[in-house]
Image (cartoon, rainbow, N blue to C red):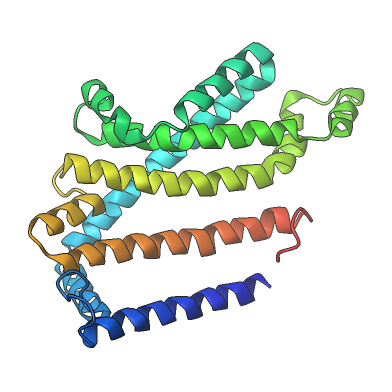
């Protein structure tokens, strides 16, 4: 069923691309505002051939991956601390309630003062965007563990490590995967927004800076190049990497029917 849904998505994407090309070729829209898809692909190939755009893509990927991994580590620590006492859990849940809805853009002035204008501020934005929803999902997953499992672990005097590996990890996996998906999307949004606000960080900058610079020079075709690359990376991670993890975890363990 999921394979059929994937093919249906491909068909819809092709229809959208054909419609995009058609409305521009028929002069139904201003081609400066919306360049033809074929022209955007041509510019993309030229830009990638120069080499700089590819390095900027890798630079953005490096930052977002580092920030994502750090966010997972922080969320895991917070979830473990919440298991120790209700006081800590109450405090962490309060933080999630306060900070989760707060846009990272609103915190940019503070992050600039605290971390300067280097990669640190981008990592802080990613951490803020990912850690709170992921922690919330982990706590929801931990509280959804059936009481019979914990009672059984108590009866056999199971160690905390064995509880985490053999009980908690399996039970919270659907919530963890859902939180990771949400966090990945928020990480990309935080990174691109940060790069567009701060401009070039380092010697190359990233995709956000590429889009910002293209917009400044009025090169709408290059703006769409950056947008398409972001979409392609997002679709690849969502439809292949997360789908692969889902297939070999919650589907394999019978937590999902794969539909």
Residue at x 23%, y 44% (from the top left corner): 195
- Residue 158 percent coordinates (x, y): 83, 26
Q: Is residue 146 left or right of 168 when viewed as pictured?
A: right
The image quadrant where one finds the C terminus is: bottom right
- Residue 212 percent coordinates (x, y): 17, 52
The image quadrant where one finds the N terminus is: bottom right
Q: How many marks?
A: 0
- Residue 175 percent coordinates (x, y): 65, 43
Residue closer to the observer: 205 or 92: 92
- Residue 15 percent coordinates (x, y): 43, 81
Quadrant for residue 232, please give it. bottom left
Q: Eyeballing the image, is 243 above or below 43?
A: above
Residue at x 46%, y 47% (from the top left corner): 184
Residue furthest to the right in view is 155
Residue furthest to the front in view is 28
Is residue 201 at least partly visible in the picture? no
Residue at x 56%, y 24% (from the top left corner): 78
Q: Is residue 237 left or right of 167 when viewed as pictured?
A: left
Q: Is residue 166 left or right of 107 when viewed as pictured?
A: right
Residue at x 51%, y 46% (from the top left corner): 182
Q: Is residue 112 left or right of 259 when viewed as pictured?
A: left
Q: Eyeballing the image, is 131 above or below 95?
A: below
Quadrant for residue 50, please give it. bottom left
Residue closer to the observer: 169 or 191: 191
Quadrant for residue 201, please give it. top left
Is residue 78 at least partly visible in the picture? yes
């Amino acid at each position: 069923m999921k394979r059929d849904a994937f093919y249906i998505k491909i068909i819809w994407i092709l229809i959208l691309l054909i419609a995009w090309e058609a409305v521009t070729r028929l002069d139904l829209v201003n081609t400066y505002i919306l360049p033809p898809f074929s022209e955007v692909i041509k510019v993309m190939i030229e830009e990638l051939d120069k080499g700089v755009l590819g390095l900027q893509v890798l630079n953005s990927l490096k930052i977002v991956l580092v920030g994502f991994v750090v966010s997972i580590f922080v969320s895991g620590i917070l979830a473990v601390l919440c298991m120790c006492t209700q006081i800590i859990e109450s405090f962490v849940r309060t933080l999630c309630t306060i900070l989760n809805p707060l846009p990272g853009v609103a915190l940019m002035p503070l992050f600039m003062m605290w971390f300067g204008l280097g990669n640190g501020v981008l990592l802080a934005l990613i951490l803020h965007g990912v850690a709170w929803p992921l922690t919330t999902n982990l706590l929801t997953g931990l509280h959804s563990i059936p009481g019979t499992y914990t009672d059984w672990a108590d009866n056999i005097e199971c160690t905390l490590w064995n509880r985490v590996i053999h009980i908690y990890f399996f039970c919270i996996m659907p919530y963890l995967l859902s939180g990771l998906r949400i966090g990945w999307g928020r990480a990309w949004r935080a990174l691109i927004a940060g790069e567009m606000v701060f401009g070039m960080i380092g010697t190359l900058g990233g995709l956000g800076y590429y889009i910002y610079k293209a917009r400044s020079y009025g090169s709408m075709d290059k703006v769409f190049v950056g947008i398409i690359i972001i979409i392609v990376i997002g679709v690849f991670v969502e439809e292949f990497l997360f789908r692969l993890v889902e297939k070999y975890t919650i589907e394999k363990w019978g937590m999902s029917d794969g539909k």
